[in-house]
Image (tube, rainbow, N blue to C red):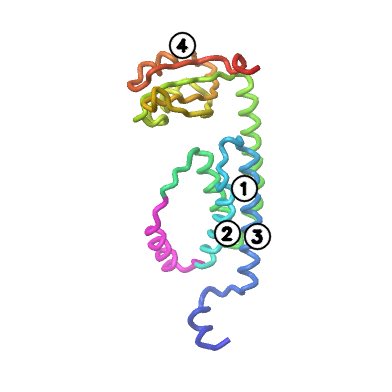
Amino acid sequence: MPDFLKTTVFDGPNISASDVMIRLLVAAVLGGVVAWIYRHTRKGSEISASFPVTLVLLAILIAMVTQVIGDNVARAFSLVGALSIVRFRTVVRDTQDTAYVIFAVIIGMAVGARDLWVALIGIGVVGLAAYLMMARAKVFSATQPAYLLSVRVGLGHELDKLLGDTLDRHLQDRELMSVSTAKQGVLLDATYETRLLPTGSADELVKALNRIEGVQSVRFQRRDFTED
């Protein structure tokens, strides 16, 4: 290789090409483990098709970034300035998804910084915690019967902004099952599968929803009554 290329294009941290390749491959494998844990600790209806792939790519990219920065503070500040130009407008739907994004980022940083034990032990501990929390949530939710909540609102309203706070105060979990229009498109019908909090009351929930401006009607019924 010409000397001028060695002193310009390839003049960076003292890392061999084979080391870079190995670290990125390890980051890809461990990112895949993170994505696997995510898939097996979340409900199928809550998983976006692209999100597990994003977790793998994040681990690889962060491993790359960590190697580029190394111990160079100037590069770190330059990278922050470059990334500030990029604006991300995708909203993470759930706080648990945010935790998995941070999980993938830390795994990538650990691999890039050659702290492989941190990555491996972290995956084990976080994976175990995620499975335990999932099992606990299943046991807890099994004690509460499932209900179908149907709410009709005006078309100009956003469901989460209009109903979210009230639903969170009365329900331990909810899942949006369907959304459709009514009255020639001027109304919106939303149906949720829900479970009340142990201290929750169906009457209080219905009353609270009916008091919201923009809500036209509310229907709350046991889930098993609708299944044949």
Mark 3 near mark 2, Cβ–Cβ under 8 Å? no
Report the quarter where the C terminus lies: top right
Classify mark 3: helix, strand or loop.
helix
Residue 81 painted magenta: yes
Residue 122: in magenta span? no
> Do the numbered discs 4 and 2 sit on residues whose CB atoms are within 8 Å?
no
Q: Distance between the residues labelled 3 and 1?
A: 14 Å
Counting residues from the N terminus, which is met first, the one under dot 1 or under dot 4?
Answer: 1
Q: Circle 2 sits in a helix, a strand or a loop, which is it?
A: helix
For badge 4, the amino acid type reads Asp
Instruction: Specify few, some or many for label 2: CA neighbours under 10 Å numbering under 14, 14-19, or 20 or more.
Output: many
Considering only order in the chain, which callout, 1 or 3, is on the residue closer to the N terminus? 3
User: Marks 4 and 1: in contact by CB < 8 Å?
Assistant: no
Residue at mark 4: 203
Main secondary-structure element of the magenta-colored stretch = helix
Few, some or many residues within 10 Å of mark 1 (<14, 14–19, 20+): many
On screen, 13 above or below 185?
below
Residue 20 horizontal/vertical position (percent): 61, 68
Quadrant of residue 78 within the rendered picture: bottom left
- Cα distance in 3D space between marks 1 and 2: 13 Å
Magenta stretch: give its range. Answer: 69-88
Q: Which residue is drawn at 51% across and 63% down?
A: 65
Q: Which mark is residue 60?
A: 2
| Residue where numbered disc 3 is placed | 26
